[in-house]
Image: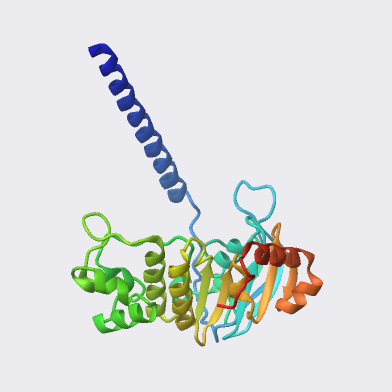
Amino acid sequence: AIFSAVVPTAMTKLMFVGEASQMSADSLARIRSIMDSKQLSVPAQPKRPAGSDVRFEDVSFTYEGAEAPAVNHASFSVPAGSTLALVGPSGGGKSTCASLIPRFWDVSSGRVLVGGVDVRDMDPHELMDQVAFVFQTNQLFRQTLADNVRASKPTATDDEVRAALSAAQCDDIVAKLPQGINTMLGAGGAYLSGGEVQRVALARAILKDAPIVVLDEATAFADPENEALIQQAISKLVVGKSLIVVAHRLNTIRNADQILVVANGEIVGRGIQEELLQSCPLYRKMWQDYTGSTEGGAEDV
């Protein structure tokens, strides 16, 4: 009886040790891949953008080790203050396009321009000042709520932080935290839901007040209540901005100034909603699938 009790316990410990070892090895491999990454070039005489328009000129990009390009000869423009939506199947190249704007990677060929300047000719800090981005999953630091929001603008006052949180529909979050904006988040502090984290990330972007905003599936995993609040926060964030949004919920981008349909790294359709329903079979099928899966059809947000 003693033996039968000891063996399962020992096996369980071995399983946990094996799992922890594998996680450590994976983490070490990721760290090494980052350390081995080629540093982006920095121009000797950086240029400053003359506006907040974005333009892709025959842009192609291939991930290291990939056989096919993630983006293949893409050309489009986003006039200052307008909204461009990127839609299409998963893995089609939408997020890669968005990530090339703040220069997370350098293009393999072609040019990405911000304010008429190739992003490779800009000072990296200047470029990052031009762009705010919110992803489908965002990371909060083990710091206070105020410090997490202030990460986008370290010189911001508490009043500015509170204003950004309020604009991002975070008043309920602040109200429930024991020390308000000075509450520690994460280990040893308060924990937020995924939708709440998204709203804090939007507050961070609102505080930054960059002229270009990139939203990558910002409402992808939000529950209906949080999605409504996130959409309200986004409406405050994007006023007067150049907006590039990667979306899978098509009702959220019906009124975009321009919609690009991206599949297999290529732009297979472009136009506004009504035009694409007539001219792009892929978009038409996506819209039919989306409205068919939404009870009562899609509604404007």
- Residue 3 lies, with reference to residue 56, above or below; the image says above
Which of the 4 image quarters holds residue 55?
bottom right
- On screen, residue 75 versus residue 239, left or right, reads right
Furthest residue in direction front, as rendered: 296
Which of the 4 image quarters holds residue 262?
bottom right
Residue 195 shows in the view: yes
Image coordinates for residue 25, horizontal then vertical, percent = 40, 37
Q: What residue do we see at 31% from left, 21% from top? A: 8
Furthest residue in direction left, as rendered: 179
Residue 128 shows in the view: no
Query: In which quadrant will I find the N terminus?
Result: top left
Image coordinates for residue 120, horizontal then vertical, percent = 55, 70
Which of the 4 image quarters holds residue 95?
bottom right
Image coordinates for residue 89, horizontal then vertical, percent = 66, 58
- Residue 63 lies, with reference to residue 190, above or below; the image says above
Image coordinates for residue 83, horizontal then vertical, percent = 60, 80
Query: In which quadrant will I find the C terminus?
Result: bottom right
Q: What residue do we see at 46% from left, 79% from top? A: 232
- Residue 92 lies, with reference to residue 11, above or below; the image says below
Most foreground residue, 223 or 159: 223
Q: What residue do we see at 59% from left, 50% from top? A: 64
Q: How many marks?
A: 0
